[in-house]
Image (cartoon, helix red, strand yellow):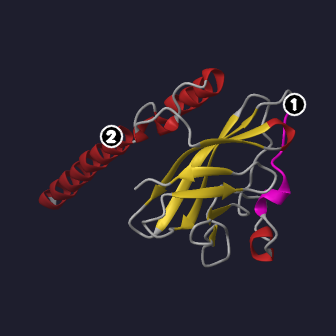
Amino acid sequence: MNSRFIMKARRGVIALVIGAGLALSVAGCSGGDGDDGKSESSASASRDSGSDPSAQEGSDEPLAELKGEEGLILKLTSAQRDGGGFVTVTGELKNDGDEPARVSVRTAGDETEIIRHGSSLGGATLVDSKGKKRYYVLRDTDGRPLTTTNMPRIKAGDVVPVFMQFPSPPTSVTEVTFQLPTFASATIAISG
């Protein structure tokens, strides 16, 4: 009976050590200052138009800045093509006005399938004018758009990170026009 008790105690200690090690490794992988640094870099980017979260991409300049309604500005920071056949466009939405602002429901577009899932940037498109093709935001199997959803009311001066995922145009296409209802359109470069 003593040997069984000792074996159980050893297993418990080993499980405790492994659990503590895993907890420490997960905490270490979180980047430490990830959220705080991101908020701070976003805030500094909005104050002085300096570096932005896409500094990893090697450029401090955004791909485009699009003006919208109620003082909203959409700054696109990357349009990255990945191996899975997608293009992910990321950026940040800033309220440059003096009052809290809400993103218009029109940014979800006019497709019933997307609208039924609530507010989103599901109305965004990429247009390849040379190939004469328009690429719509992707949807999951339930019809939800693969974009930032449930957009909050944005306080004056605040910044919200956003993303949209599209099917990838052919690799020969390196520039497309980004369009989002209620915002100006702009030509952006696709990398990757």
The stretch drawn in magenta includes residue 174:
no
Work out whether mark 1 precedes mark 2 in sequence or the reverse, and give the earlier one: 2
- Amino acid type at mark 2: Leu
Residue at the (62%, 26%) spot, across then down = 43
The residue range painted magenta reads: 99-108
Residue at the (56%, 43%) spot, across then down = 63
Identify the mark at residue 99; answer none if there is no mark: 1
- Amino acid type at mark 1: Glu
Question: Which residue is disc 2 drawn over?
Answer: 24
Density class for disc 1 (Cα within 10 Å; few <14, some 14-19, many ≥20) is few
- Helix, strand or loop at disc 1? loop
Image location of residue 18, percent across then percent down: 25, 49
Q: Looking at the rendering, in which quadrant would you find the C terminus? A: bottom left
192 relative to 70 in the view: left or right:
left
Q: Is residue 36 above or below residue 87?
A: above
Res. 11 image quadrant: bottom left
Q: Are marks 1 and 2 in contact (CB under 8 Å)?
A: no
Residue at the (59%, 27%) spot, across then down = 45
The stretch drawn in magenta includes residue 107:
yes
> Which is in the foreground here, disc 1 or disc 2?
1
